[in-house]
Amino acid sequence: MTKSNTSGLTAFGDDMLAQATLPAQMRTGALWQAVEHADVLRSLLPTLEAPGANVRDTLLGFWREQTPAGLKFSKQFEALKEEEDRTPEQRETFSEMQGQLKAINKKLSDAVDVFKGMETLKKLKRTVMVRKVPGMNKVYKCYVIYASNPSVKADEQEAENVSFNVGALINVNHIKDKITPDMTTTGIRKLASSFKLDTPNDTKGGVEVDRTKLGSMAKVLDAALAGVIKDGKIEGISSESRDDMMRYWAHLDHELSAEEKDKARKAFNKIAEPIQVKVPNIVSKVKEAVKKSA
């Protein structure tokens, strides 16, 4: 067995350590971003908190248009998106890039929420401390303490820091109205950790969607569209409904791969073919059948 040289062993050891650190970096990445890029995240808040703001579009738009990495990414992504006849390699690359956009949106959203969570705790007079984990690159921990709680005696003040993970920091924004002036840091963390954000299925009056029925729902929608699209525009519905339909189409156009869209077009074209194409000589066959039945 050939032994690796010194530089090879060094690189191997470094690579293994870096890979072993990745899970911790993933778990705490939003906290690292919130600390490392606090100024950028703070500058985005006015736009994100404006009435009717689209968080996903704002965050991805900022990254793709205002950062060198985003500009380079977008140039390649748009070129692949416009390519009608992608090679297998191009399809794979485009699919991977779509996954990257989803991940970037999630990471950015989490970083913003973590930043807001820490700012909320500070406004509530809590001391927030972020510490880098020794020996681990881009891995941070957050500790919170209420060392000067006016509701308790001096000898009853909190003496130990309470660790807040990324999930708890994100949820602080959703429970801030429930935090009382005398609430302990441990109480805040417990409340934040147990919080569950309502989804459309959980929210009273929301749209309940059973994913096992998506197929039948799509068929109903497809049937409803028959005859309402004229001259390239959906007619006979409200402008709001039209916007919803266009957003639905844009969602699929953005998310689906070229291969999936090509498959769908072929399936649709078979359905949309004139009856004369599907059944050659249909007119003469019908006439002949009528004669036989007369």
Image (cartoon, rainbow, N blue to C red):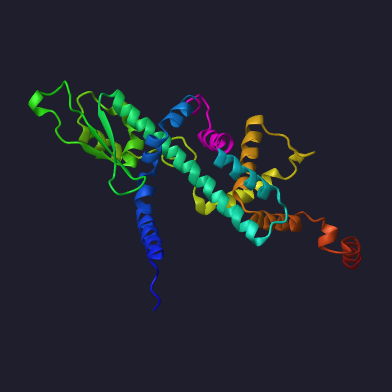
**How many numbered discs sit on the rendered protein?**
0
Judge from the rendering whether residue 114 lies leftward or rightward of residue 59; answer left or right. left
Whole-percent x, y for residue 276 in the image: 85, 59
The one of 124 and 289 positioned closer to us in this rendering: 124
* Residue at 28% from the left image edge and 45% from the top image edge: 133
**Image position, residue 286 (x, y; %):** 87, 62
On screen, residue 7 above or below 119: below
Point 60% across, 55% down: residue: 93
Residue 250 placement, left or right of 1: right
Report the span colored magenta: 47-67
- Quarter of the image with the C terminus is bottom right
User: Which quarter shows the N terminus?
Assistant: bottom left
Dominant SS type (magenta): helix
Q: Nearer the viewer, residue 67 or 256?
A: 67
Q: Can residue 200 be seen in this view?
A: no
Is-magenta flag for residue 60? yes
Q: Is residue 241 left or right of residue 25?
A: right
Q: Where 104 sits versus 157, above or below?
A: below
Q: Could you say which quadrant of the image residue 109 lies in?
A: top left
